Each structure stands twice: as C-alpha cells, then as structure tokens.
Amino acid sequence: MGRLEGKVAVITGAAGGIGRVASARFVAEGCRLVMVDLSTEQLEQAAADLDPDRVEICEADVSSVQDSQRYIKAAVDRFGGIDILVANAGIEGQVARIVDYDVEEFDRVIAVNLRGVWLGIKYAFPQMIERGGGSIVVTSSTAGVTGSAVLSAYNASKHGVIGLMRSAARDGARQNIRVNTVNPCPVETRMMRSIETGIDGDDAQSVYERIQDSIPLGRYADPAEIANLMLFLVSDESSYLTGGVYMADGGSTS
C-alpha cells in the first residue's frame, strides 16, 4: 500500500512547478486527487500521465469564494470527501520597491496568496471534520520569515500564511486536523525565472548565479524535494506535527 492509500487530496496551483510534481507523487502513493489551477489546458497537460480514475481537474481562482467552494465540492462529489489540502497556489507579483509598487497589484497578490489559503482552509475544514480529521499543508517561503526590498507584497503574503497556519492549527487540533507550512528557498520553477528577470531583465543569469551562491547548499531546490516534504506532512507519518514552519531552504535561514 502507498503512503496515501485511501486518502482524498486537493492541491491548488497543481499545474505549476511544485504542484505538478506533488500531484504525481501523491497519486503514486495511492491517493485520489483534485488538481486545481487557473487553466484547464495546463491542468490537462499536468494530469496527462496520471491515472484518470484517480484524478479530477478543476479550473478555479482560489481568491474567489465561489470557485473555492466549487473545488471543495468537486472533491466531495467525485471522491466522497477530503482528507488532505495542499494550499500551494501563489503568485510572485511585481518586482519593485514599495514606492513604485502598484496598489492593485499588491491587492491581487494578497488575494491569491493569503485570502486564497484562508478560503481553502475555511471550506475544507467541515469536510475534514466529517471524515475524522485531515492534514493541510500551506506553501509559504523563505520570504515568509525574511524580508526583501523588491517583493513586499509577496513577503507580506508569505508571512501572513504562517500566522494563518498557526491559528488554523489551534482551531483544528481538537478535530484532528493538522496544519503546517512548507517554506522553500528558490526552486527551479517558472516563478523564479520571473523574479530573476524582474530584478535584472538584461542579465537574469547573473541574478540566478548570485542567488544560488547565497544558498549554503549552493543550488536551487528541485520541485521534487519540496513535494517530498509535503508528502511527509500530509501522511500519517507526521501524525503529531501541527502548527509547524518547515524550512526547505538549503540552509538559507540557518
């Protein structure tokens, strides 16, 4: 039996770098899965090699109340409930100093990265209570425990989800719902290519090299390394872990 045999999981941001790898990893470990993202086409590509009997895709904007309710309902209707939520959807937003940062863009980042997580937790909790408990993993970041001059909205949102996680862990503990964050350092994904270009569009490669050199292990994380930590935290192997901030940062915050 797989480590998630008999479980039903929902992963938001499932068509992106970490979400896509985590989706494949979770299905390989035996769960049934609802993959959530903004684009049906990208979700279909991400799910193409997965068992269609175990996977449902759902196009949704996680910052929307109606869409959040809909992806939770998709899991209940197709698979009977929810045991696992990986609230992974997120956007980097603008790369700019605060004085130059667009107000509407700030609101958009907070809506997706923080409100979207809150909505997912809000609507997943009742379904998990019905099944006797569950596990929620929220993707934060090293940006959730440190600062940056050019990613103020992203930093604020990732700090915010840690506070939200801690409240949710207290809220859900008596119902056997565990809630934790995973905090990656830069990962080899589209998001980091966007940030590197935003910092220096003329020489993004040098930005990549500088960031990489600042990490004690000397490299970006592979998405699979983050997915492995997520898998541990949603599995029964971590049954006594809740309210935790789990750094996956190559030593960056050591």
Image (cartoon, grey):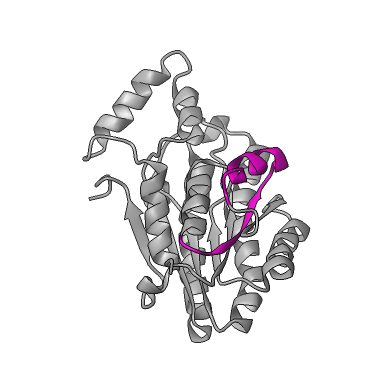
Q: Give the camera-side residue of 125 and 245.
A: 125
Q: Residue at x 63, y 63 (%)?
A: 120
Residue placed farthest to the right in the image? 66
The segment highlighted magenta reads 29-50
Q: Give the camera-side residue of 51 and 110.
A: 51
Q: Residue at x 45, y 33 (%)?
A: 192
Q: Give the camera-side residue of 219 and 224.
A: 224
The percent position of residue 3, horizontal first and vertical second, equals 42, 67
Q: Is residue 47 magenta?
A: yes
The percent position of residue 164, horizontal first and vertical second, equals 52, 65
| 198 versus 142 height, above or below | above
Q: Quadrant of the N terminus?
A: bottom left
Residue 103 in sight from this viewpoint: no
Is residue 125 rendered to the left or right of residue 96? right
Q: Is residue 41 magenta?
A: yes
Q: Give the camera-side residue of 207 and 124.
A: 124
Q: Quadrant of residue 100?
A: top right
Q: Residue at x 54, y 43 (%)?
A: 153
Is residue 221 rendered to the left or right of residue 119? left
Is residue 233 rendered to the left or right of residue 154? left
The percent position of residue 81, horizontal first and vertical second, equals 65, 73
